[in-house]
Amino acid sequence: MSFAITADFIASGNTALLAAHEDDYAALGRQLERRGIAIEKLVARAMGYSVAVPTWGVGTGGTRFARFPGPGEPRHIHDKLEDCGVIHQLTRVTDNVSPHFPWDFVSDYNALRQEAAQFSLGFDAVNSNTFQDQKDQKLSYKYGSLAHADKATRQQAVEHNLKCIEIGQKLGSRALTVWIADGTNFPGQQNLSRMFENYLDAASQIYALLPRDWLIFLEHKMYEPAFYSTVISDWGSNLLAAQQLGPKARCLVDLGHHAPNTNIEQIVARLIHAGKLAGFHFNDSKYGDDDLDSGAIDPFRLFLVFNELVDAEMRKAKDFAPAYMIDQSHNVTDPIESLISSAIEIQRAYVQASLIDREALAAAQDSNDVMGAHKMLKQAFITDVSPILAEARRRKQGPLDPLKAYRASGYRAQKTAERPPVAGNSSGIV
Ligand SMILES: [Mn+2]
């Protein structure tokens, strides 16, 4: 019998923290009331928020230099689901996982779906992988996949994506996320126009076979592993591709996949305008695609992204139904701790953005009250909504302090004893 954190353990941990929590919650409630905001509405919004965890995120990541495995790492999808279950149990905000194939291949997907349901988990978008070669793979992706110069290699990549859709249907997913590493390292290596056309041709074959209620999420990334050119390098190329494919194709924004200093919230606004925003891969960065923990470096940028998202939600923007997922690499922390912390930071930005009086902001903007409009955003951002997040968790039988509960539970030590290390584990390397 494998170790699990019990409901009683969470409840008894909350008992010790309850008086202080109630005090903080009441104080924040009074403060918000003075500002004309009902705290209960925000608790309801926090309780309704959800962000998916990627199955690969619970393994220790690595860099191209090294990987330093952590104790008790998940060995396969079954262990990963167990860890994702704990993240959801402690945050009450991550009720979906996003699987990755072939990393999460199993023989029985109906059984896997039931296994996930035991942890109160469902399946979000399925991710295909044509950026590395697998054992027994016929043709190599060294020089590309969907945009490869060779038609047979493109076909093989198309078939892999179709296989992912087939698996996703069994798991209850409704979207396929496609990120390709295709690009070049040398000027002249490939014809830049032809590569894009090859990609569009291959992607349209996948699109044509999407189930009726499915979407395809195209993810752009500026560079790496290709360092001279990347086929779907930015939101412009992404939008062109999504527009050409059709209404079921949307553009996925990964916060780390842009040039430094890019105004990502403006990209979000543009994609919302076009009805093409698929959703997000959340992380944080300082220099490039650093894959650091969400909100760890620049929580204000995260807030500004949510400012656009909540604005679109409030004005019921057309075709606005973003999918949210965390996409990080945890190299120096316990991945469960990082994912707990990140999920809460993302939920925090959502609630903070929900504090803004949209009518008052529009009035300030219309009258060119620059400082007044700016201060409305700033006031929302500096409001400590922690008691709202804690209350939302408590009402869902979650812990007031998830990190404290996780550390006190001894979960990692138990898993270290239960899970002997395995050789060649690719956990977390993306
Ligand atoms: Mn991503």
Image (cartoon, rainbow, N blue to C red):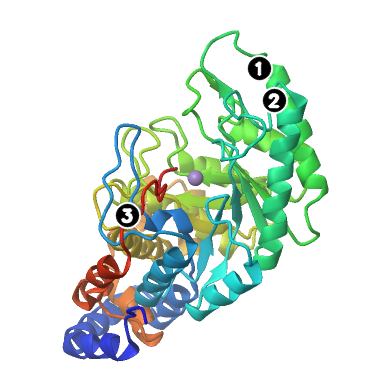
Q: Mark 1 points at which residue?
A: 192
For the residues marked 1 and 2, what is the alpha-carbon distance in whole angstroms? 7 Å
Question: The residue under label 3 is which amino acid type?
Answer: Lys
Residue at 23%, 81% in the rendered image: 27
Q: Give the quarter of the image for residue 166.
A: bottom right
Q: Does 330 appear above or below 118?
A: above
Q: How crowded is mark 2: few (under 14 residues within 10 Å), some or many (20 or more)?
A: many
Helix, strand or loop at mark 3: helix
Contact (Cβ within 8 Å) of mark 3 with mark 1? no
Closer to the camera, 90 or 106?
A: 106
Q: In the image, is 4 to the left or to the right of 249?
A: left
Q: In the image, is 286 to the left or to the right of 97?
A: left
Contact (Cβ within 8 Å) of mark 3 with mark 2? no
Across and down, in percent, residue 143 comes to: 60, 23
Q: In the image, is 170 to the left or to the right of 413?
A: right
Q: Which marked residue is nearer to the observer: mark 3 or mark 2?
A: 2
Closer to the camera, 219 or 42?
A: 219
Question: The residue under label 2 is which amino acid type?
Answer: Phe
Q: Give the quarter of the image for residue 112.
A: bottom right
Q: Which mark is residue 196?
A: 2
For the residues marked 3 and 2, what is the alpha-carbon distance in whole angstroms? 42 Å
> For disc 3, does the CB lie below 8 Å from ligand 1?
no
* Observer able to see residue 383: yes
Contact (Cβ within 8 Å) of mark 1 with mark 2? yes
Helix, strand or loop at mark 2: helix
Q: Residue 378 carries which label?
A: 3
For the residues marked 3 and 1, what is the alpha-carbon distance in whole angstroms? 43 Å
Question: The residue under label 1 is which amino acid type?
Answer: Leu
Q: Residues within 10 Å of mark 1 (few under 14, many from 20)?
A: some
Residue at 61%, 39% in the rendered image: 136
